[in-house]
Amino acid sequence: MLTLADHILDITENSVRAGAKFIEISIEEDTAQDLLAIEIKDDGHGMSEDVLQKVLDPFYTTKTVRRVGLGLPLLRDAAERAQGHFFLKSQQNSGTQVKATFGLGHLDRQPLGALINTIIILIISNSQVDFFYKHRHNDRRFELDTREIRKEIEDIPINHPEIIKYIRAAMEEGLRDIESEA
């Protein structure tokens, strides 16, 4: 995984496989604290205590197509290399929360990557799932909630090309606005 967006995509796809119908993706950038935090919470099946104890072992996976599960261990390693922390909380039938923090300006921090493309891919390929994306850069915020978009578009599918075009434009404008200095 070369970027943090790759990690977000991987963890979020795990949430979808766990039956999540609502996934919250949160990114916080705090330049004063030199902190970047990424958090993904879902309402999926969650993990048993037994699985939770094993899930950070790269040679453990619940997938049947391969025998390694590198997503969570790689995210934990990326956080620790950038003087950050990794947090995982899960309970069966109550969902999962994954949080990784990083030194925002740390030399070994992976770049954020193509966040907009990642969110668009998630929405297109998981149209039955609702996503709440929030991004804070210091005191500026951007939020995108597919539940709100669904209310506006009524019976048009959320992954319709025109809706995706709208979502992309809204994200581009919103993220550009929070990154710009007044």
Image: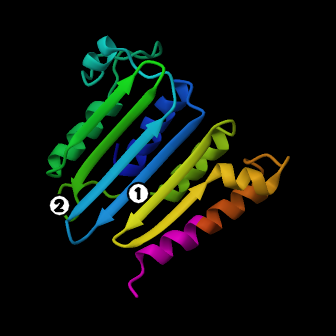
Q: Which residues are magenta?
A: 171-182
State which quarter of the image contains the N terminus. top left
Front one among 175 and 149: 149
Assign the magenta stretch its main secondary structure: helix
Q: CA distance from mark 1 to mark 2?
A: 16 Å
Q: Please say whether residue 174 is one of the residues in the magenta stretch.
A: yes
Q: Secondary structure at mark 2?
A: loop
**Residue labelled with disc 2:** 106
Asked whether the beta carbons under mark 1 and mark 2 sit within 8 Å of each other, the answer is: no
Horizontally, residue 6 falls left or right of residue 153, namely left
Position of 3 relative to 43 (above/below): below
Position of 145 relative to 75 (above/below): below
In the rendering, at what x and y percent does residue 171 appear?
A: 57, 65
Position of 46 relative to 127 (above/below): above
Quadrant of the image occupied by residue 49? top left
Q: Pointer 1: residues within 10 angstroms few (<14), some, or many (20+)?
A: some
Front one among 58 and 11: 11
In the rendering, at what x and y percent does residue 119 appear?
A: 55, 51
Horizontally, residue 11 falls left or right of residue 108, namely right
Query: Residue, x 30% and y 33% (percent of image)?
Result: 88
Q: Residue furthest front?
A: 94
Identify which amino acid the numbered label 2 is placed on: His
Q: Pointer 2: residues within 10 angstroms few (<14), some, or many (20+)?
A: some
**Residue labelled with disc 1:** 113
Snapshot colouring: rainbow
Quadrant of the image occupied by residue 180? bottom left
Identify which amino acid the numbered label 1 is placed on: Gly
Q: Please say whether residue 109 is one of the residues in the magenta stretch.
A: no
The answer to whether residue 159 is seen in the rendering is yes
Quadrant of the image occupied by residue 140? bottom left
